[in-house]
Amino acid sequence: ETTTSEENPGQEAESRETINLIASTHSPPGIPLTLAWDAYLDEIEERSEGQIEFERYYNGGLSDGFDVIDAVGNGIADVAVVFPSWQSGKLPLNTIASNPGLHENAWTAVKASNELRQLIPEVNQELENHGNVNIGNFGAPPMYFISTDSLTSFDDLKGQQVLTNSPTQAKIAGELGMVPVGMNLTDAYDALTRGIVDTVLFSAQGAMSFGLHESAKHAWKLPMGTTTGLYTMNKTVWDSLPADLQAVIEEVKEEFQPESFHTLYQVTEEEYEEKFIEAGGTIVEPTEEDLNFMMDIITTHVWDEWIKEQEDKGLPGEDVLNTYKELVEKYEQENPFK
Amino acid sequence: MGKVLNTINRSFMKLELTFLLIGGFLVFFIMFLITINIFMRNVFGAPIVGVYEMVVQCFVALVALGFSYVQGQKGNITVEVVTDYLPEKFQKFFHLLGYGVGLFVIGIIAWQSGLQAWSSFVNQDYNANSLLKLPLWPSKAFITLGMATLCIRLLLDIFVCLFVKEENKKKQDEQLVS
Amino acid sequence: MNLDPQLIGVLGLIVMVILVFLRVPVGFVMILVGFLGFALIRGSGSSFSIMGNTFYEALSDYNFTAIPLFILMGFLAYYCGIVTQLFDTAKKWVGHLPGGMAQVTIFGGAGFGAVSGSGPASTATLSKIAFPEMVKTGVDKKLAYGVVASVGPLAVMIPPSILMIVFAIITQQSIGQLLIGGLLPGIVAATVYMILVYILVKRKPDIAPAQPNTTFKEKMMSLKGIGPFAILVFTIVAGLYSGIFTPTEAGGMGAFVVFVMVLLKHGFKWEIMKNSMIETMKTTCMIFILVGGAFVFSYFLSVSRIPTTLSQFLVSLPVEPIVIILGIILLYLILGMFIEMISAMFLTLPIIFPAVIALGYDPIWFGVLLVFLVEVALVTPPFGMSLFILKGTVPGSDLRDIYKGAVPFIFADFAIIALFLLFPQIITFLPSLMN
Ligand code: NA
Ligand code: NA
């Protein structure tokens, strides 16, 4: 139950009732994505001096990840982790950061996503159309090829069966001469151990949490897109919050989240890469030449198509992509963790 | 009243059986789809694109198509552990209570899932996370169809329970079996 | 409404039990109580939205699609006589032993677990094909119910197992270790069931009358009856383990193999196809009304905070670790009587799992123990999916008989849990070899 103090927004903080909000994520507890979400919620509870408290539901206990913006819009949850690409095409512009080759690290992605929303209002408008307000953004480090076979050149990729989960990944894989195999992630372990697929597209931590490193020992770090997401709040709930608490959430989003995400995601990913190597794996960095080849494919077959798809819907796709790219470049310069 | 109801009931059972058999064909269809895909993947290294999504959509549809038939055959799970010991005159009440609860909740589901299917149709929602951009509304619409059919079945059950005498029901069942 | 969510939760549970005992279909009751309860706690708008979404959300899970395919495989195998032949052979070999036919079902059911990754599929298949065969040879119905209800769920212990994989991911454990960790306990559980049947039959021989003994020649002659079945099992096991198809695809492949056998043996017979389709659909749809209802009800129970409050209370108790473990087992046994266990665990694991690990228990051991508790919940009255599946698939079955039949096996389950507590090596031995 949500108790709010909308009647007395000016009331003194200490005499207000605690606001209990339901927080939902489809992700299981303990993985970096969820740890970052928990850290964010903790920070809001702390900075609001206990005036906001979250009741937390994990692992889709309240709503699975698909169409979760509707769950928030309809008040099933008050705040939630939203993967824009899982929302049945309802948040086209918000999928911007999932495009491969755009950013390399988490801090930059968070900063760029936050500022993008201020520069181009259409991005947030998509959320508001479904009764959601943006209260946080993240972009994980990119996924890459992890395989049972040693991969060091584009020739090695040809004919490999690769487990793909999005049209974009399938498209790039196809362009590289690989065979995309659509499959349920719960089948990934068996599929890889028994050789039904040769290659998966994951980060080291993703692969290790699915146990895939037991059979796939070879990673080639060509960028294949990334997990990006947002945190949203039900709009009615947001509007009912006193201005000072809204300000607390804005602060946490701007000041706390980029660094927290760096620590909990980027650094963990690096630790996972070390663990991957300890477990007998090898990680090959792509050469400049390889990267350029890959970026060519990404630009013509993914970015251009993404833009076209948005423009066909009358959305400012080109503007969003170019702005995001410029913001990433700007924040790459400013990145304190480089 | 009883006679008319029996006629309606019998035609409706034919409809339910038809739906059920369509569902049955879908089971065979996904069986072939999966087998062909295994064959294509292993022999030609060319799996069929989007099998995984097609199987899920067919599965949603086939389950929805059978709900009403199961209720018509009184195949939904009930617990008679207590009611069997209660006098005969209460039995009709329990039947009506069960149908009534069913009609209430399934009615809401039919209505609400209908709204969802419609919104998916209008907004052209698609499965963005899959290799094929399959629209979502057909499988959502199947849920609405299945639930709506189940509603009519429950309504019929209520009328039959109220207006058809026991002996007629038995006779009717025998006719259906033969 | 300003009622405390936990109070609403308790009232919801009470209303659910009353309505179910007033013979309202279980699926409808779970939806009703879930809908009203959620509305009381979170408002009617969100509750309506749950009603519109949940069935689609629940059904559009690829893992479920294997269920109708395994069921179809079972029915096709039944209608083309594969199962009857198999039981005839078994009768000639072990029918003269005490409880021979029931033992065969336990053995075969555990074997079926090695090709099926899903508990409900396995129970439904066994109840439709093995149950009648047992009864035909004079096995007491109650005993037969108990055997099928308990052995079917073993499919989630014995690899492949979708549930084990889900648990490994949630609890961040090695999938490989958890999968292999279920194998020995699965075999131990099957063995305990066989011992139980032996004891029951020794005490009351007429619940599973011994079949006339046969000559060695007859035994050998009968072996050709298992040919088709052997081919089926070989195809699935070989295909699974050599990487030709995945566990969820195995159902489709298995059904196809039997379909071809039917064609070879009988040609295309519309009657066989039609009957298989009708029976498969009836069983599948009966199961999924319950699954959908369980989803709606679980959302309500989640927001009532009962499971989380109970587990927080449990792990904060200042007592010996073993007492907390026993408390957790008891908590899950009680929760499992009323609600769908898998969602109950998603809810409570974030609290319970870290606490158990902090107490020094082995995560793989605890994971496998949990999966076994899920299985026990499938067999405990009043709400046990395995029991309901039997009720739905065996014509003219009486739930009271099913409950009665399940009781000795629930006691066997307690014995199995005790074994896991006393000899954790049963679970940890095979995974430890992988390190
Ligand atoms: Na299994
Ligand atoms: Na139970």
Image (tube, rainbow, N blue to C red):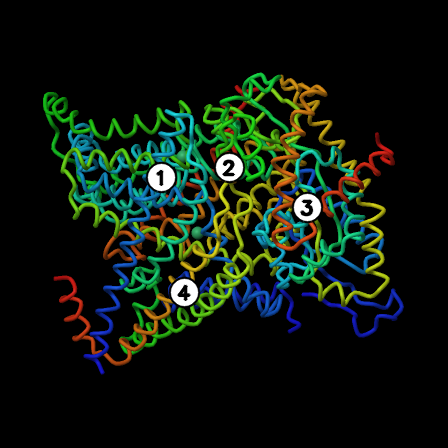
Residue underneath mark 1: B33
Establish if C213 lies above or below C27.
Answer: above
Q: CA distance from mark 2 to mark 3?
A: 22 Å
Q: Can you tell which of label 2 and label 3 is closer to the viewer?
A: 3
Residue toward you, C180 or A168 = A168
Mark 4 neighbour class, 10 Å CA radius: few under 14, some 14 to 19, many 20 or more? many
State how many labels appear.
Answer: 4
Residue at (67% x, 19% y) in the render: A284
Q: Can you tell which of label 2 and label 4 is closer to the viewer?
A: 2
Residue at (36% x, 26% y) in the render: C239
Q: CA distance from mark 1 to mark 2?
A: 20 Å
Residue at (33% x, 40% y) in the render: B31
| Label of residue A229 in the image | 3
- Mark 3 residue's CB less than 8 Å from ligand 1: no
Residue underneath mark 4: C20
- Mark 4 residue's CB less than 8 Å from ligand 2: no
Q: CA distance from mark 4 to mark 1?
A: 40 Å
Circles 2 and 3 on the same subunit: yes
Circles 4 and 1: CB atoms closer than 8 Å: no
Is A286 left, or right, of B113 in this rendering? right
Circles 1 and 2: CB atoms closer than 8 Å: no
Residue underneath mark 2: A186
Q: Quadrant of residue C24?
A: bottom left
- For mark 4, name the chain: C
Circles 1 and 2 on the same subunit: no
What amino acid type is highlighted by mark number 3? Gly
Which SS class for mark 3?
strand
